[in-house]
Image: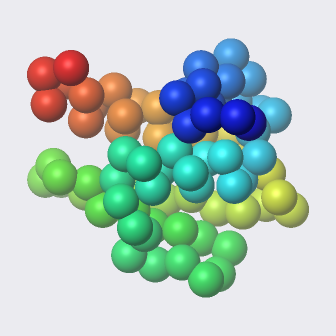
Amino acid sequence: MSSIAKIPEEMKSNPKGLRFNDLKKVCEDYFGTPRQSGSSHCIYKTPWPGDPRVNIQNQKGNAKPYQVKQVLLAIEKLEFNNGK
């Protein structure tokens, strides 16, 4: 992928075909440095109460499709809360 800005569009059109590293780039762009990494999981903190985290998992170089959808929902919530 050439640009982080293009990855969310790819996520929406094909959540099953996304590379884990692309999802990780998007999460770091929106949520900052993961509070846990180094294993197959990366956990990112979000600014809202309740379930304040985004968890993604590396599955043989690919992102899990349900986690891609969860990240998209978290991005939408973040943008809504920030008034974008």
Report x, y in % for residue 20.
Answer: 71, 53
Relative image position of residue 4 (x, y in whole percent):
56, 37
Q: Reply above or below: 22 against 82.
A: below
Q: Nearer the viewer, residue 55 or 30?
A: 30
Above/below status of 67 relative to 56: above
36 or 26, nearer to the observer: 26
Residue at 83 percent of width and 58 percent of height? 61
Badge count: 0
Residue 51 visible somewhere in the drawing: no
Quadrant of image for the N terminus: top right
Of the 4 image quadrants, the one containing the C terminus is top left
Residue drawn at (13%, 22%) of the image: 83
Q: Quadrant of residue 35?
A: bottom left
Give percent across and percent down for residue 78.
25, 35
Q: Is residue 28 above or below residue 14?
A: below
Picture quarter containing residue 65? top right
Please say whether residue 26 is visible from this viewpoint: yes
